[in-house]
Amino acid sequence: MSEIGKITKIVEKRLSPLRFRHSLGVADKARRLAERFGIDEEKAYLAGIVHDYAKGIAGSELLNIAKENGLIDDEVYREVPDLLHAPVGAFLIEKELGIDDKEILSAVRKHTLGDLDMGLFDKIIFLADMVEPGRDFPGIERLRCLVERNLDEAMLFALESTLRYCMDTGRIIHPQTVKVRNHFLKILK
Ligand SMILES: [Fe+2]
Ligand SMILES: [Fe+2]
């Protein structure tokens, strides 16, 4: 079995069937976007497969892993520990799967909140996660179009959709999402 085949099997065992299907969708979309924007397609596929590696871990356990290993642990993370599945996921795929590629680790770390420093690879994984075929939210068709044309415009749209969703459903907003949204707004002006 290929390396990617082995990793896919491991991920399948860790995630719920629904979450695993989502990961396959993200991987596939990431590969297609990588082809479109001229970056390593297989690497993008692999990043999609592993991006939610820590998603099945309970919030208390995510907090423990984050604390023990000096990962980001601010007040909002304590309120919404599920957000930690991104940095904890990056930590675990390096430790448990031996993935040491800097771009994959960065993209997994930044896939929920985004970051002020996002390269092409980071944006492709972030956006593939938002638009894979299983996703459905108001504005998704517009986002799917933007993703094909302009990744920065798509990032702005995606972050604003996330902020709107958090407000509409009474969820806590991580200030990082606001910062990153303002960052993309500025660079598009
Ligand atoms: Fe995720
Ligand atoms: Fe995801």
Image (tube, helix red, strand yellow):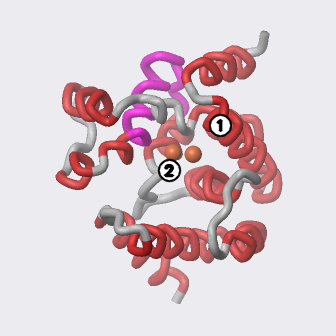
Name the residue carrying label 1: 18
Q: Which residues are magenta?
A: 85-101
Image quadrant in which the N terminus is located: top right
Q: Which residue does the image show at 26% across and 43% down from the upper left? A: 72
Q: Quadrant of ligand 2?
A: top right
Question: Which residue sits furthest bottom?
Answer: 189
Image vertical order of residue 50 relative to residue 83, above or below: above
In the picture, measured across the screen, residue 135 lies left or right of residue 159, that is: right
Image vertical order of residue 58 relative to residue 150, above or below: above
Q: Which residue does the image show at 46% across and 75% down from the upper left? A: 164
Image vertical order of residue 143 relative to residue 108, above or below: below
Q: Which residue does the image show at 56% across and 38% down from the upper left? A: 51
Q: Position of residue 147 (x, y in %)?
A: 71, 67
Mark 2 CB in 8 Å range of ligand 1?
Answer: yes
Answer with the quarter of the image where residue 62 lies.
Answer: top left
Name the residue carrying label 2: 111
Element carrying mark 1? helix
**Residue 17 drawn in magenta:** no
Element carrying mark 2? loop
- How crowded pointer 1 is (Cα within 10 Å; few <14, some 14-19, many 20+) is rated as few
Label annotation for residue 125? none
